[in-house]
Amino acid sequence: MSAAPQLSVVVPVYNEEGNVAPLVGEIVAALRGRCDFEIVYVDDLSRDGTLGVLRGLKAGVPELRVVRHLSNSGQSAAVRTGVKAARGAWIATLDGDGQNDPADIPRLLAERERADPGVKLFAGWRVDRQDSGSKRWASKWANAIRSRMLKDSTPDTGCGIKLFERAAFLDLPYFDHMHRYLPALMQRAGWKTISVPVNHRHRASGVSKYNNLNRALVGLRDLRGVAWLIVRSKRTMTEEL
């Protein structure tokens, strides 16, 4: 097996047939020649031609790896599957709908080079959202409530583009929808996080898998759970003699 890459780009997808090839091409354009990387796509048992497109791309994109769920398990499970399969010590994540811009990954890597070693998460911050007015309104209120409850000092936890240390992520408690609370969870573990302004784009193909109501109902329950985890956390410093 070849040496481990410097970076693994993890992309969870479900029914994103029209977005796969353009996004893979953009990832390659953003990173090839800049660093040694791999792309790990996790197909969450898509019902369209997503898996077929990924299989077709593998021959021409040596950096591409494809992992498939045998049951539909959700975005958090797909992200965790990709991180576990990844060989890089650092992970960049992107949503599979193409709204995140892979050209922002080098910006996150540059922020990492300048940051304190205690920073283990660089979270994208969509300063110019390209979603509908209702989604922007719902996201604004959700972020305000979350920030007040969790005190994570993060303006946008819903952005799919993030850069984090693989080992730190795998040490976090896992639960469904955890990908929306990574700054708070990283801080709970004793690490620092930084929000970085990034580009945001319109969806070019397919449809969103979420609506405002189901996000709100699930989010309230998750918020209480994450708040409980933070209150009950206990960190112990150690040294080897």
Image (cartoon, rainbow, N blue to C red):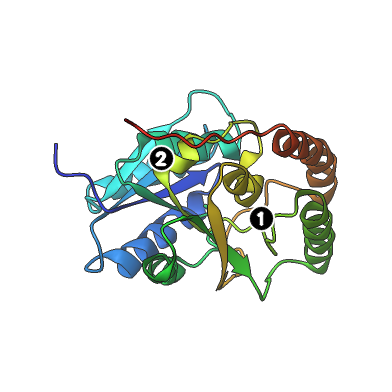
The local crowd at label 1, few if under 14, some if 14 to 19, many if 20 or more residues have their Cα within 10 Å, is some
- The circle drawn on residue 167 is 2
Q: Is residue 184 left or right of residue 236?
A: right
Q: Is residue 188 above or below residue 120?
A: above
Relative image position of residue 94 (x, y in whole percent): 50, 55
Q: Is residue 164 left or right of residue 141?
A: left
Asked which secondary structure carries label 1, the reply is loop
Residue type indicated by callout 2: Ala
Relative image position of residue 220 (x, y in whole percent): 84, 41
Nearer-the-camera pick, 234 or 73: 234
Foreground mark, 2 or 1?
A: 2
Nearer-the-camera pick, 232 or 58: 232
Q: Quadrant of residue 21?
A: bottom left
Mark 1, residue position: 158
| Distance from the alpha carbon under mark 2 to that under mark 1 | 22 Å
Is residue 43 visible to us here?
A: no
